[in-house]
Amino acid sequence: MSELAGLPADFYWGVATSAYQIEGAHDEDGRTPSIWDTYCRRPGAVVNGENGDVACDHYYRMPADVAMIASLGVDRYRFSVSWPRVQPGGRGPVNPAGMDFYSRLVDTLLEAGVAPWLTLYHWDLPQELEDAGGWPERDTAHRFAEYAELVHDALGDRVSTWTTLNEPWCSAMLGYDVGRHAPGRTDFADAMRAVHHLLLGHGLAARSLRSRGVTDLGITLNLGVSTPASADPRDVDAARRADGLGTRIYLDPLVHGRYPEDVLADIAARGAALPVHEGDLEVISTPLDVVGVNYYSSHVVKATDDPAAPEVVPTGRPVTHMGWEIVPERFTELLLRLHRDYGVPMAITENGAAFEDSADPSGFVDDADRVEYFRTHVAAVAEAVRGGADVRGYFAWSLMDNFEWAYGYEKRFGIVRVDYETQERTLKQSALWFRDLIAELRAVQITSESTS
């Protein structure tokens, strides 16, 4: 417990998922296609041609899944709402059958003593909005704000914590620049327009939710540390560029109400621009109550002949099944930097690892490698808190094995194993460890309170 010293008494613990990765029921009860339904049907886009049509069948197994969540002793459950399930096509009225699922989910969580943490957008843009131009089009930001209002109309009386976007970097860069995520487009200028309109959509939704009385409001970003491979000015500049397009292009407008000048210059040098209108940055910088931090790894970067494409240099550290180096000390560094540069309250909304799990005949996985990943990264959070970072909670990614985007079902991040043929769930050793950690910390807190 000494390595976790400093975590506040009200520090909360949770597990996280996203709609398309677990729900299934892709064309039932009025749900229309998202960009991921379409992308998964593109030949060669996803490993083994797999998709989220069934995924973990959570849409029908939700009550049992919530009971499983509660058995872990967590305080909160972070989930996302499927936009095309509750507002088919991304326009018009709410779909009552789709919204009813989330209403039942929220009620079931509350009855189980688990607080819902709702994310409005985890990458499942309605296909009709992509057909109209997608996130590179300004209108999509306004459609998102309207969707946020529909969800709040239905759930705002029972959900207190609202997150607008999950990882806009992935939506913009993987979706519109390099094409490894839906919708699979490859146009840097479109990606830059998407960055701004994602942030504008966040701001418009945030303003609307604020006007409705929401007092626990945030956005979730995937972040890491970019370290230059050497003191060579070219490598230093490569790290600056990576940090600019990975971190500062989001947090500077969100917190400071401006885009970084060096990043704007880098973008212009590549023939692109951010389509900022008067008043946009004021909207985007609507005050936040929490910034969600998703952390998996960090990178050492080296310059190449193409300034826009630095080389990631392996350092010999152990890697996960994703090939990502395990560097928990950079997690501490990141959180301290975010505290220093942005001064915002934070929650770790995703942290975890995929490993090549091996199940015994009962389905149990003794995933000591994942346990060690969690142990060192939770300790890294505690170290950052001792250093002054305002981190208020931690969510393990993921609750269960699920559809891992372009990797299909090949990569397993879950602390619960899913047998995709039978849909049987089995708690892995990491789930038992996480459950016991939470219980032990609570026991320590109760003892401390009783003796103070």
Image (spheres, rainbow, N blue to C red):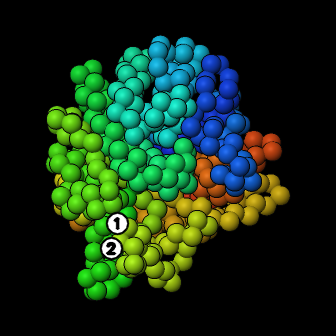
Q: Nearer the viewer, residue 194 or 270?
A: 270
Q: Is residue 8 visible?
A: no
| Residue type indicated by callout 1 | Ala
Instruction: Measuring from the top left, give residue 84's x and y in whole percent.
Output: 54, 27
Q: Residues within 10 Å of mark 1 (few under 14, many from 20)?
A: many
For residue 69, above or below residue 62: below
Q: Residues within 10 Å of mark 2 (few under 14, many from 20)?
A: many
Q: Quadrant of residue 300?
A: bottom left
Secondary structure, mark 1, is helix
Q: Is residue 89 visible?
A: yes
* Residue positioned 42% across, 70% down in the render: 309
Q: Secondary structure at mark 2?
A: helix
Specify whether 297 is left or right of 393: right
Q: Residue visible at 62% across and 43% down?
A: 39
Rendered residue at 74%/64% (across/down): 358
Please state if 266 lies on the left or on the right of 62 as rendered: left
User: Disc 2 designates what residue?
Assistant: 238
Q: Using the rendered view, name the quadrant where residue 333 is placed.
A: bottom left
Residue at horizontal 45 percent and vertical 75 percent from the top = 312
Tag 2–tag 1 contact (CB < 8 Å): yes
Kind of residue indicated by mark 2: Ala
Residue 441, relative to residue 307: is it above or below? above
With 422 as the anchor, is 232 left or right in this view?
Answer: left
Badge number at residue 334: none
x then y, percent, for residue 227: 34, 75
Distance of mark 2 from mark 1, alpha carbons? 6 Å
Q: In terms of depth relative to the viewer, which is nearer, 303 or 154?
A: 303
**Label placed on residue 242:** 1
* Quadrant of the snapshot with the N terminus: bottom left
Q: Position of residue 162 (x, y in %)?
A: 36, 33
- The residue lying toward the viewer, choosing from 4 and 285, is 285
Count the labels in the image.
2
